[in-house]
Amino acid sequence: MRVVEPVIELGRGLWTTLRMMFDKPVTIQYPEQKKPVKARFRGRHTLKRYENGLEKCIGCALCAAACPADAIFVESSENTDQARFSPGDRFASTYEINMLRCIFCGFCEDACPTEAIVLGDQYELSFTDRSQAIYPKKMLIEPVGAGASPTPQETQPGLYTRSVPEMRDPQD
Amino acid sequence: MNFLLVLEWLIKGFVWALVLLGGFAYLTLYERKALARIQSRVGPNRAGPWGILQPIADAVKLVFKEELTPAKADKLIFTLAPVITVVPAVVITAVVPWGPSLDIFGYHLNLYIADINVGVLYIMSIASIAVYGIVLAGWSSNNKYAMLGGLRSSAQMISYEIALGLSFVSAILLAGSMRMLDIVSAQGGYWLHVIPKWFVVLQPVGTAIFLIATLAEVNRAPFDMPEAEQELTAGYHTEYSGMKFALLFMAEYTKMIAISAIGATLFFGGFNGPFVEKFPWLGPIYIFIKIILLLFGMIWVRATFPRIRYDRLMAFGWKVLLPLSLALVFITAVGIILAQQQPHLIFFVPLASLLAAGVAVAMIDRTLRRKDYARR
């Protein structure tokens, strides 16, 4: 014969929900308030530069070959010492990523021999038109840092013959 | 019947209808906010400061939505059903007094629309009409989910209306009148200067039955069987869109307000409160606060309890609430006869009804545990 217990159990349920009312809400007011992404977050791609402003990308199209979604298109041209974009013989004259096709798997990062393409922390990728979904090189490339000069640069002959830098162990 | 009187009625009716319709809009916001807080969220806060323009944004959205009518629907009844649902929900509160008489600018103003001598009966009869709207909406949609939702809701509302009516009877017996004003004035005053003479003190179990049965009557969780999303998509309003859907939605929320107003009047002392005799304008404020608290109770229960299985719902209505409320009517009648001999014996009513409720709870518990045992 349980008379009071069933009623108390109903009351305990009600008390639990009432107590939650005085909890701090977990909501993040998104456009005004943003959570930092995790360290290994895979967001929009960025094409990196060396410290002197030369582009890391050498237009080898290994990223396009590795891409399972066929989202990357690369077209390369010859570098000259008068107009040098990247070390070595060639650079990417066209570099396009279709963000509608991209699945953000990060295989392009793994395939890149020069660590030129990196998936960054940018995740606000809305567009109103299908043609806007194709990000060209000038949207993807990193801005030129302080003390560096923009590409194309005029360089000394015989200085940038090696297209792939000597690799060190990764730092992070 | 002079012109001024007609004008007074018109204005009061208009104001009350506006209060109900505006109240419906803000009840949706209130519910969303309260539910959000219970679930550790913030709730709507984008349209206007603290989201206070959210109901307006919702209304504009619904007005501009396309209205679909299913190809083989019964067009006349399909259009009429939302109307049949809304009208009773709005007119049901006509008999609820929201304050005593008020003298403003030398004019004697009664703060209620109609003071008919069978007020409670009026409420019961109007409440039953609302079932038609839901059944017709379900039937005319030519959709099996809507049909099942309508059938369920008719069965549920008719079943719980009996318990609801019998819980009304205990309030009627205690007041000795079916007139709402008499019921309110019977709840005026205090015992020992602190405990208000509300019927919730005299008849706590009757109040509990009323609150449970009203949840079933307005199809609210945990008795929202007619619109059980998981099994019936949206129940009787599956095929409704645009303004017709808004009307069905409005009926549901207006009924919530109406039933809270009725509950506040019948069991929670209506417009009674401290100093209301001296300052009659406090009456509407008191009943408003009571309605808000009762509405919070409904939202709170929705946030807490899961939906009850359909057969359990019907079993609870017929096998528990009906016998219990019949017993309460008997206990109340006996208590009133005893009180005629000795006024303090009126407290036989709450004690005996709590005992009856205890027996009911023990029986439910025993039955459920027996089923548990059989399953093992």
Image (cartoon, rainbow, N blue to C red):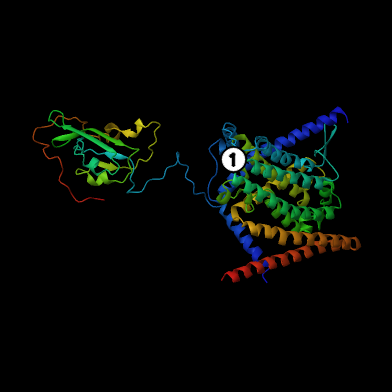
Q: Is residue A139 left or right of residue B57?
A: left
Question: For residue B81, what is the image quadrant?
Answer: top right
Q: Residue at x 77, y 57 (%)?
A: B201
User: What x and y, as percent, mark residue A111?
Assistant: 22, 45
Q: Is residue A13 above or below residue A47?
A: below
- For disc 1, the chain is B
For disc 1, the marked residue is B239
Q: Is residue B359 above or below residue A37?
A: below
User: What x and y, as percent, mark residue B163?
Assistant: 75, 55
Q: Is residue B338 above or below residue B115?
A: below
| Depth order, front residue of B296/A106 | A106
Q: Residue at x 40, y 31 (%)?
A: A128
User: What x and y, as percent, mark residue B169?
Assistant: 81, 54
User: What x and y, as percent, mark residue B24?
Assistant: 66, 40
Question: For residue B111, what is the image quadrant?
Answer: top right
Three-letter code for the amino acid on which mark 1 is drawn: Glu
Q: Is residue A116 visible in the rendered structure shown here?
A: no
Q: Quadrant of the N terminus of chain B?
A: top right
Q: Residue at x 59, y 52 (%)?
A: B303
Residue at far left of view: A158
| Depth order, front residue of B15/B357 | B357
Q: Is residue B229 left or right of residue B164?
A: left
Q: Is residue B35 visible in the rendered structure shown here?
A: yes
Q: In the structure shown, which secondary structural element does the residue marked by tag 1 occupy?
A: loop
Q: Is residue B265 left or right of residue A79?
A: right
Q: Quadrant of the C terminus of chain B?
A: bottom right
| Depth order, front residue of B95/B372 | B372
Residue at far front of view: B72
| Label 1: few (<14), some (14–19) or many (≥20) C-alpha neighbours in 10 Å | many
